[in-house]
Amino acid sequence: MATLYIVATPIGNLKDITFRAVEILKTVDCILCEDTRTTKVLLNTYDIHVPTMSYHAQSALSRTEDIISMLKDGKNLALVSDAGTPCISDPGSALLSLVRKECNEDEVMIVPIPGPSAFVTLLSAGGLDTSSFVFLGFLPHKKGRETLFKEIATAPRTMVFYESPHRIMKTLASLASVLSDSPRRVLVGRELTKLFEQIISGTAGEMFSYFENNPDKVRGEFVVAVEAV
Ligand code: SAM
């Protein structure tokens, strides 16, 4: 029976990978990557010389079919994303959903190899209530965006989401507007585990002002968490 390993990789610091992940990446027949060039940096660091193949949400159907035939032929594969845990807010989930649809459980075993994920990394250091929280992935750009901010404003649970450097100011401005008279803490994690890692917190207004006054910090990768009501 073939195995498809879902292998978590670092979100920045290349040392954040498990022994088990390295061992599996060294022994599979092929590594399915979101972007082979990004993953090659990791593979070179750990002296892993296994063939790679790219997959992507926009991948031609034929590529997905190739991957499914490899599994049906008994090949062991590893699925990785550019960073973190595959299939969490990234294109791996579309591929995995097809594999689960097309392959029987007695044909392919799907085995998760856990590791870092950006939102858990922020929550682990944030000091917010994590007994229950809602992960929103990336916020919608248009439809449903306003309603979502209203939901965040009254949420009884910690809310956490991903944001790009191009949209972080717009998002912090919206948070500052819906939380204008609230002391609730907003936590911003930037470039987690990387050289310029930053975790800052304050009211939504304070977070907006901080980045407005420090435009050099409006770059890199962001996770935002909002304290529960
Ligand atoms: N699968 C990944 C995970 O497990 O975290 C998430 C993939 S998603 C396509 C990429 C987003 O995750 C980025 O746009 C950013 O919001 C967040 N992210 C990834 N790495 C990060 C880091 N080192 N610091 C802060 N945010 C990060």
Image (cartoon, grey):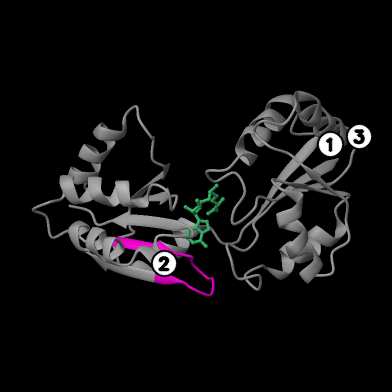
Residue 100 lies, with reference to residue 221, above or below; the image says: above
Labelled pair 2, 1 in contact (Cβ < 8 Å): no
Residue with the mark numbered 1: 71
Observer-nearest of 123 and 13:
13
Is 193 magenta? The answer is yes
- The secondary structure type at the circle numbered 1 is helix
Identity of the amino acid at label 3?
Asp
Residue with the mark numbered 2: 124
Q: CA distance from mark 1 to mark 3?
A: 5 Å
Q: Is residue 218 left or right of residue 84?
A: left
Residue with the mark numbered 3: 73
Q: Is residue 158 visible?
A: no
Labelled pair 1, 3 in contact (Cβ < 8 Å): yes
Mark earlier in primary sequence (2, 3): 3
Question: Residue placed at 48% from the left, 67% from the top?
Answer: 192
Identity of the amino acid at label 2?
Ser
